[in-house]
Each structure stands twice: as C-alpha cells, then as structure tokens.
Amino acid sequence: MVRRLLVDAGMRAALVAILVVAACSDSAPSGPDASATPDAATAAPRSLVEWVAGSAFVFRAKVVELEAATEPAPPDFGDPEHLWNLENMIVVEPVRVSLEPIELSLVAGSHHTVILQTPARELAVGQELYVFGRVFMIGTSVVMVEVGRLESDLPFDRVHQVVHETERYLIDRALTDRMLIADRVIWATVTSVEAGPGPFSDEGPWWWSATLEPRRTLHGPVEIDPLVVHFDGSANFCCYDWPKLHVGDQALYLLQPDTITGLPDARFVLANALDQQALTEELRLRSLLASQPVPPLL
C-alpha cells in the first residue's frame, strides 16, 4: 500500500518534507547515558543506546552499488540539511533485519539507499555491514541516513540481542526518569471526573479534573486523603495518548507537579503517556525505582 501511494511524485515530495522534519526533531534519550550521537565512522561503541534511539532501521546489509541511489534527488525543500550527495551514498540489499517499522519492512531482495557520514568509496561492492539508519525519504524504496555502522564480523544473533535489549532499556529509562521527577507514584482509584472550562482550542489540551483515592504509594509522600489531578479530556492530536480518566479506573499514576494548566486548584497533572501504568506493572515500577536500568553492552 505504501509503495503504491508513493509512486505519485507530488505525494513523495510532500512526505519527504514531513519525514525530514520528523527525523530532525528526534530527541536523544535523557538520563546519564545521553550524549551526542557517535560518529558512524568511529570504532563501534560498547553501548548502542544513542544509535538505537536514533534509528528506525537496524539491519545487516550487502553493498550493491557505490555513489548511487534508488530514488531521484528530492527538491530543495525536502533536503534542508543538504544531505543528498552521491559521493556519500550507497545502494544496499538487506541480508537480515533486526529492527524496522511495521509499515516499512525491508523485504528480502529489495534495494534501498543509505546516505553515509563518510565517502562511499571507503566501502566495496559486495561488502557486508550492519546499518543503523533513520528515515530520510520514502518512494518505491527507502532512503535512510546512517546513524551508526558495525562491521560484519559480529554475529547477527548477538547484535540482534543487544539492539532489542537496548530498546527495552530505553523504555525503562524513560519510565524511570518520569517517575523520579514525579511528586509521587501511587496506586489509586478514580472516584469522580469533572470537565473543566473550554475547550479553548482544537490543537491544545482541554483540562479536566479527577479525584483519586490512593491505595498504595510507590514513590513520594504517603497520603491517604483524596487527591485532585488534572488531565487532558480531549482527543486532540497534541495529547491523544495522554491518560484519559474515567470513574472506576484503577491504575498506577505518576503525579507530576502541575506547572502547566494555570488552574487555580493546580497541584498535580498527568501530561504524558507514561503517567498512567497498568496495575500489573507494579513490580516492574518498584524494581526500576529500587535499581535504575543499565544499558546492555555489545
């Protein structure tokens, strides 16, 4: 379906712009492991945190062509970073795939383009390597920008294992960071919900209030009295995945200090998809609070 739609040149150009903006807006992971993305041409890092965090694709590839591309050059507005340079580009064929978006699978035998950080002439046709890449554009094939590169002498099973352990680490790291900045993390039942004034915009949150009855406290001050928390009650794109509370809900809530709603009774707010966790995650949350996650090493 994706390929059929993208044959149209106008739609391809529009998606180029969208994907480039999205790629440029990717943020590095927070916490003690955050640092600048290592240069792909340097020796492989023992930790793949930055590379995995910045990549949509991780796969073992065979170089098919040097200084070539599977798609025509994008228009100027589709390449604001001026990355398109055939001298730094190769065409590759996937050999084994470790990580890929569900909607953009790298089919066996297909050819795709990688924009390298170094000249293509440093590689050879037929050479194999592990590519960590982010999406640059999509046409009848995928053009990606190299985030990192590993030599092919590493066993695929080991690379695959560390890539997916790193993905798990990034999820755990984000949740741990969110819990640590929360005022408290509680098991609670929603006893009432009330719509706030508004909505004021179709693009921003519509703040509602909910009363929570605490059952247990995992982190922060212990309190048994009911607590009022603000949450977004809209379905607007900005906040579609934020917690939506209903009377009778029971969950683990990461209550963040309310510094954003501007409401007179502001104390706590749920303003991130991570701020509500299923009760079945209690042991995991307790474990992360007791011992912060450590990135796997290659």
Image: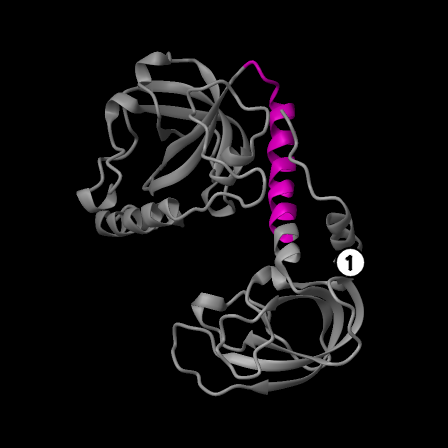
Element type at mark 1: helix
Q: Give neighbour class at mark 1: few <14, some 14-19, many 20+ (Cα, 10 Å).
A: some
Q: Is residue 266 left or right of residue 183?
A: left
Residue 24 position, x and y percent, is 36, 45
In reply to whether residue 135 is colored magenta, the answer given is no
Image quadrant of residue 211?
Answer: bottom right
Residues in magenta? 153-175
Residue pictured at 36% horizontal, 37% vertical: 141
> Mark 1 highlights which residue?
282
Residue 165 position, x and y percent, is 65, 36
Q: Is residue 175 above or below residue 230?
A: above
Residue 173 position, x and y percent, is 63, 46
Viewer-side residue, 35 vs 103? 35
In reply to whether residue 168 is colored magenta, the answer given is yes
Q: Residue furthest left?
A: 76
Q: Is residue 133 above or below residue 284?
A: above
Q: Is residue 50 above or below residue 288?
A: above
Viewer-side residue, 91 vs 39? 39
The quarter in which the C terminus is drawn is: top right
Residue pictured at 56% horizontal, 63% vertical: 272
Q: Amino acid at mark 1?
A: Glu
Residue pictured at 58% horizontal, 62% vertical: 273
Main SS category, magenta section: helix
Viewer-side residue, 182 vs 208? 182
Viewer-side residue, 224 vs 13? 224
